[in-house]
Image (spheres, rainbow, N blue to C red):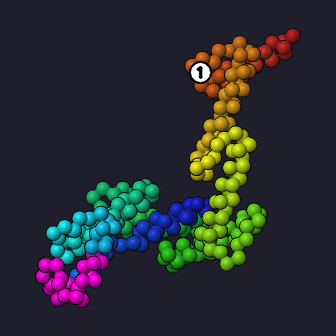
Amino acid sequence: MLKKLTGLALVGAIVLSVPVAVFAENTQGASTAAPTSKSAKPVKQLLLDKAQIFGLSTDGKTTEQIKAELKALSAAKHTEQLNKAAAKLGISTDGKTAEQLKADIQAAVQVKLKEKATKLGVSADGKTNKELRAALKAAVLPKLQEKAAKLGITTDGKTNKEIRTELQAAALSKLQEKATKAGVATEGKTAKEIRAALKASKESKRAEKLNEKAVKLGISTEGKTTEQVFAEIESALKAKWEKRAQK
C-alpha cells in the first residue's frame, strides 16, 4: 500500500509538470541576431548554460535558435515522461496529443487514488488529485510512525518520505544480516538484488536436498527440473507407503 501511494505520487508529479518555454518570447520583436547590449547578455548566458546542460551545440546559433531548440527539447522530454506514466498505468498513447494523454493519466490516477482512499477510509468527495494525495499522505503517516516505532525509529518532526527512507534503511540492514547468515554476499547490492540472491540460494539448497533424497531412492535427476524431481520423489514415497500399508 505504501509503495503504491509513492508510485502514484511520482506519476502525479509527472502529470503536473507542463512543458513551458525555456525563456519567455521577446514581446518587442527582437531580431534573430545575438543580443549585444549589456542588459541582454545575462539572458544569452543563461541560454548558453542551459544548452550546455542538455548537451546542445550553440556554435553559430542565434539566441532565438537556441531558445527554439531548448523549447523543443523541453516538450520532447515532457512527452517522454507522459508516455512513461501512461505505460505504468496501462494507458494507450496512440494518436494522442500531450494534452489528451495528460487528461487520461489524470483520470486514471484519480481512479487509483479513490481506490486507495476507500481502503484507508478517506473521503474523496469533491477533492482534486492534489487534495486527495495530501489526505492520503496524512492518513498513511500514523501507519508509518507505528511501523517505525516497532523498529525503534524516532519519527518526531519527520515527513512521510523521511520515515519511509529510514524504514527502507532498516529493512536493508535486516536483509543484509539474513543474507550474511545464509552465506550470501551483499556488498554493493540493493534490497531487491539481495532478496533475489536469497531466493536463489534457498532454491539451490532445496534442489541440493532433493537431489540427495532422489539418489537415496534411486531416482535419476539428470536434465530434470527441481519440480520434476520433487514430483518423482513424492510418487516414489507414496508407492512405498502403499506397499507398507498392504503388509
Residue at point 68% right, 15% down?
A: 219
Q: Amino acid at mark 1?
A: Lys
Residue 167's image quarter?
Answer: bottom right
29 in the magenta segment: yes
Image spot of residue 73 (x, y percent): 28, 66
Mark yes or no: residue 243 visible: yes
Q: Is residue 183 above or below residue 4?
A: above
Please state the extent of the stretch shown in magenta in the rendering.
26-47
Q: Quadrant of the C terminus?
A: top right
Residue 43's image quarter?
Answer: bottom left
Nearer to the camera, 48 or 66: 48
Per the image, the residue denoted by label 1 is 224
Q: Is residue 109 above or below residue 42?
A: above
- Looking at the image, the residue that sits furthest to the top is 247
Residue at point 30% right, 56% down?
A: 94
Mark yes or no: residue 76 visible: no
Secondary structure of residue under mark 1: loop
Image spot of residue 169 (x, y percent): 65, 60
226 in the magenta segment: no
Nearer to the camera, 55 or 116: 55
Nearer to the camera, 123 or 5: 5
Residue at point 71% right, 40% down?
A: 182
